Image (cartoon, helix red, strand yellow):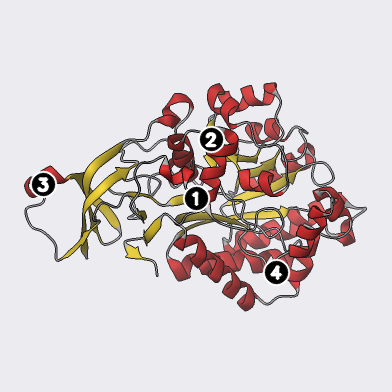
């Protein structure tokens, strides 16, 4: 089916370049005022100014939608989530209010181990149902491509169950979904005094089973004090890479322990979190060709210092933004709020934040040729906004629902 959308006030992020943006280029967001957009089935096939429409489109399709002064931008590309989990953790939210730290909650059996216990007692069918509900909500909030991690199983059966759910979500929705194996998310209670033993389970048991079913695109490790060291991370990455899994790593959330150097040395696709950075690490990321993914809602929820986005951009880093949707430290997939927080708290310009959540988010999932901008040949993944006066109104109006409708793969989401 051919769909023509006319009278678009602003058509944002129009580009035929398919490369991530860094430095000053991150602030460039090409747009067309008073535009049209032409879609064939699930693909963008043309766009332009309304004053050229009669010349460029001589045969109008039957399905014409008048945007009536509303605007369009590409769907968000959320490149770091933990969307598959069994239950929320609002009791730990109260613990945080009472002054307990993330590490203290984890030491008491909360945090990731809490989620692991609940997940291993939940059926695959129930996990799929819960995850599908969350994914639908994310879609309605404008997310058109998403990465989802395992890591709440911490057993062979639990990790496989999570990754199978992610694959089922891919098949059920047709959405761009990337799958990451995060068996090294925490150390299970039964391996409390034998971390190396658990690493061997990851390498010798989990990875071969995952590869046999082709369940993952990437491998991840929580490189952090009390969890997995830089040396552990290297060992696990190398094992995953032997099965074709590329590293996408949790680094520098709470401490700087060499995760950035390890990720760069192992050609990671992205290094994520980055709340705790020194000047040397900022310079390293500025010279690196991979993606530095910032998760400001996690820092916000944990009352941590925000990531130094301005310093990273000025150093030349390729910055992406993602939601880190998870039950413990970022319980939501609202990328509009991620963008607003990035502008308000991290001093990113609106253009920079939107590029980081679209083009660079797509690059962090290696789907830049499929989505992330309004480009001919890319997926028709678009957000039709409510009437807005300007681009800056998007982060400015952080508490308003700016979305009128969302289209993914050429279909309006309901």
Tell me whether circle 3 and circle 4 mark residues in contact (CB < 8 Å).
Answer: no
Which is in the foreground here, disc 2 or disc 1? Answer: 1
- Where is residue 229 shown, x and y percent of the image? 80, 40
Query: Spatial distance from mark 3 to mark 1, Cα to Cα?
Result: 34 Å
Residue designated by label 2: 319
Secondary structure beneath disc 4? Answer: loop
Query: Spatial distance from mark 3 to mark 2, Cα to Cα?
Result: 36 Å
Tell me whether circle 3 and circle 1 mark residues in contact (CB < 8 Å).
Answer: no
Query: Spatial distance from mark 3 to mark 4, Cα to Cα?
Result: 52 Å
* Residue closest to the far right: 193
Residue designated by label 3: 56
Image quarter hosting the C terminus: bottom left
Q: Of label 3 and label 4, which has the lower sequence position?
A: 3
Which is in the foreground here, disc 4 or disc 1? Answer: 1
Query: Spatial distance from mark 4 to mark 1, Cα to Cα?
Result: 24 Å
Q: Of label 3 and label 1, which has the lower sequence position?
A: 3
- Where is residue 370 shown, x and y percent of the image? 38, 49
- Label count reads 4
Residue designated by label 4: 87
Position of residue 256 relative to residue 402, above or below, is: above
Q: Of label 4 and label 1, which has the lower sequence position?
A: 4
Q: Nearer the viewer, residue 208 or 346?
A: 346
Q: Of label 2 and label 1, which has the lower sequence position?
A: 2
């Amino acid at each position: 089916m051919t769909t023509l959308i006319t009278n678009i006030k602003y058509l944002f992020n129009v580009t035929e370049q398919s490369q991530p943006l860094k430095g000053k280029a991150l602030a460039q967001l090409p747009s067309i005022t008073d535009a049209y957009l032409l879609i064939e089935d699930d693909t963008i096939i043309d766009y332009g100014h309304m004053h050229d429409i009669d010349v460029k489109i001589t045969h109008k399709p039957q399905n014409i939608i008048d945007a009536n002064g509303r605007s369009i931008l590409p769907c968000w590309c959320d490149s770091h989530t933990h969307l598959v989990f069994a239950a929320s953790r609002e009791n730990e939210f109260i613990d945080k209010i009472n002054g307990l730290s993330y590490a203290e909650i984890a030491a008491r059996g909360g945090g990731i181990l809490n989620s692991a216990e609940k997940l291993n007692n939940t059926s695959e069918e129930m996990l799929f149902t819960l995850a599908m509900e969350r994914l639908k909500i994310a879609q309605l909030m404008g997310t058109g491509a998403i990465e989802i991690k395992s890591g709440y199983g911490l057993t062979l059966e639990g990790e496989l169950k999570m990754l199978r759910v992610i694959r089922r979500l891919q098949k059920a929705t047709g959405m761009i979904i990337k799958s990451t194996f995060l068996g090294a998310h925490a150390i299970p209670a039964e391996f409390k005094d034998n971390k190396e033993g658990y690493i061997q389970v990851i390498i010798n048991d989990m990875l071969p089973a995952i590869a046999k079913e082709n369940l993952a695109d990437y491998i991840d490790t929580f490189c952090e004090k009390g969890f997995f060291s830089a040396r552990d991370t290297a060992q696990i990455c190398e094992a995953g890479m032997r099965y074709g899994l590329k590293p996408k790593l949790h680094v520098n959330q709470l401490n700087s322990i060499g995760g950035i150097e390890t990720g760069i040395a192992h050609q990671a696709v992205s290094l994520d979190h980055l709340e705790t950075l020194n000047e040397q690490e900022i310079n390293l990321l500025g010279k690196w060709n991979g993606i530095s993914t910032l998760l400001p809602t996690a820092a916000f929820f944990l009352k941590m210092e925000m990531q130094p986005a301005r310093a990273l951009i000025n150093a030349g880093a390729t910055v992406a933004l993602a939601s880190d949707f998870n039950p413990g430290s970022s319980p939501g997939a609202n990328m509009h709020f991620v963008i607003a927080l990035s502008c308000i708290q991290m001093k990113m310009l609106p253009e920079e934040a939107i590029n980081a959540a679209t083009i660079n988010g797509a690059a962090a999932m290696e789907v830049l040729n499929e989505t992330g901008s309004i480009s001919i040949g890319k997926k028709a993944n678009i957000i039709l906004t409510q009437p807005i006066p300007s681009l800056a109104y998007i982060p400015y109006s952080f508490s308003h629902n700016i979305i009128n409708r969302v289209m993914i793969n050429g279909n309006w989401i309901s």
